[in-house]
Image: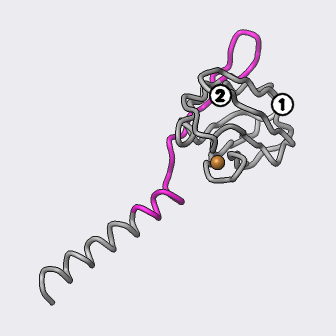
Amino acid sequence: MDSTEIAVIIGGVVSIGFVLWYFFGERERTTAALGAEGVQEIEITVKGGYSPDTIVVREHVPVRLNFYRDETASCSEQVIFTDFGISKHLPPFQTTSIEFTPDRTGEFTFMCGMSMLRGKLIVEPR
Ligand SMILES: [Cu+2]
């Protein structure tokens, strides 16, 4: 094995690691803050993805997700919560709020219109 082959193998292993991390790795997990009005609220920046992309909320407590879309890339112009029947248009450089009350626990994916950008809403029991 010469050094080129070794470099190719190392490169391959690093890319596989990246792909695994990208799709399955533990993400930035953030719990929505419970405000004075009894609403769990969180700010999410939309720019080539969702940040944070793993949001923890409590069941049966109203949720307000404030999506700030910090780009014009058309990919992120829509956000969809399939499990809760929510689809919302996000105008660029504005905050768009999505409000609902999670009525069940579990892990729910939210995504852009093409399901390329993804985030996860974790609803924990009260
Ligand atoms: Cu997209």
Count of residue discs: 2
Query: Going by the image, does 27 lie left or right of 79?
Result: left
Residue 44 place in picture, x, y as percent = 59, 30
Which amino acid type corresponds to the residue marked 2 in the rendered image?
Phe
The residue depicted at 63 percent of the width and 44 percent of the height is: 75
Q: Is residue 20 magenta?
A: yes
The residue depicted at 76 percent of the width and 43 percent of the height is: 80
Crowd tier of the residue under label 1, counting other residues whose Cα lies within 10 Å: few below 14, some 14–19, many 20 or above: some
In depth, the one of 117 and 26 nearer the eye is 117
Query: Which of the numbered marks, if any, corresponds to residue 67?
Result: 2
The answer to whether the residue bearing label 1 lies less than 8 angstroms from the nearest atom of ligand 1 is no
Vertically, is 66 above or below 110?
above
Query: Going by the image, does 83 lie left or right of 74?
Result: right
Q: Nearer the viewer, mark 1 or mark 2?
A: 2
The CA span between labels 1 and 2 is: 17 Å
In primary-sequence order, the first of circles 1 and 2 is 2
Highlighted range, magenta: 18-41
Helix, strand or loop at mark 2: strand
Vertically, is 5 above or below 99?
below
- Name the residue at the left extreme: 2
Vertically, is 1 above or below 92?
below
Image quadrant of residue 126?
Answer: top right
- Name the residue at the top extreme: 36
Q: Which residue is mark 1?
A: 101
Residue 22 place in picture, x, y as percent = 48, 57
Helix, strand or loop at mark 1: loop
In depth, the one of 84 and 71 nearer the eye is 71
Residue 8 place in picture, x, y as percent = 25, 77
